[in-house]
Amino acid sequence: MKPIRLEIVTKVVTFFDHCRRCQVLFGQAGLDKKIHQNEMEEYPPDLKEEVMKLSGWIRELSRLYKHRLLIKVIDVQSPLGIYKSLRHRIRTYPGFIVEGKETYIGWDKSQLESLLDKYIQSSLPSKQRSLHPSLS
């Protein structure tokens, strides 16, 4: 079975790293976590909360659907994110695009899961019918 493609257009928290040599040096000194923690503290609380909630959803979807789902996170401020937002009429975030066809916008997990289940079920029946001929 080919995995269902789920694209998530959302606001993304961005971190900047140092050059490789400096990164190794900071990592050995234990400073890299402090630097990223300071960067995270600069974001508004509502954005941090939204990012944490969405990352929890992504982990849960990955656990629930395993190999049946291919997840791609797209930054809304990137050129691709702007294009996807315009193309699929996403005005609030996060926006979930399933197989490039249907879009769900919002935080209702059950609606998103039912949309994913619909696509997974639609990919199964034709294969199951050919494998299990009727007994009549």
Image: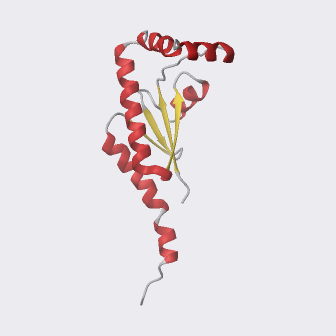
Which corner quadrant holds the N terminus?
bottom right
Residue drawn at the location 55% of the way across and 12% of the way down: 29
Q: Is residue 109 above or below residue 41?
A: below
Q: How many marks?
A: 0
Res 112 → quadrant? top left
Q: Is residue 66 above or below residue 14?
A: below
Q: Name the residue nearer the viewer: 124 or 36.
A: 36
Q: Residue furthest front?
A: 28
Q: Position of residue 64 (x, y in %)?
A: 39, 49
Q: Position of residue 95 (x, y in %)?
A: 44, 33
Residue drawn at the location 43% of the way across and 60% of the way down: 121
| Colour convention | secondary structure
Q: Name the residue nearer the viewer: 33 or 51.
A: 33
Q: Residue furthest bottom?
A: 136
Q: Name the residue nearer the viewer: 43 or 118.
A: 43
Q: Is residue 78 above or below residue 118?
A: above
Q: Position of residue 94 (x, y in %)?
A: 42, 30
Q: Is residue 102 above or below residue 117?
A: above
Residue drawn at the location 58% of the way across and 13% of the way down: 26
> Going by the image, does 121 lie left or right of 1?
left
Residue drawn at the location 36% of the way across and 33% of the way down: 106
Which corner quadrant holds the C terminus?
bottom left
Q: Position of residue 67 (x, y in %)?
A: 50, 52
Res 118 → quadrant? bottom left
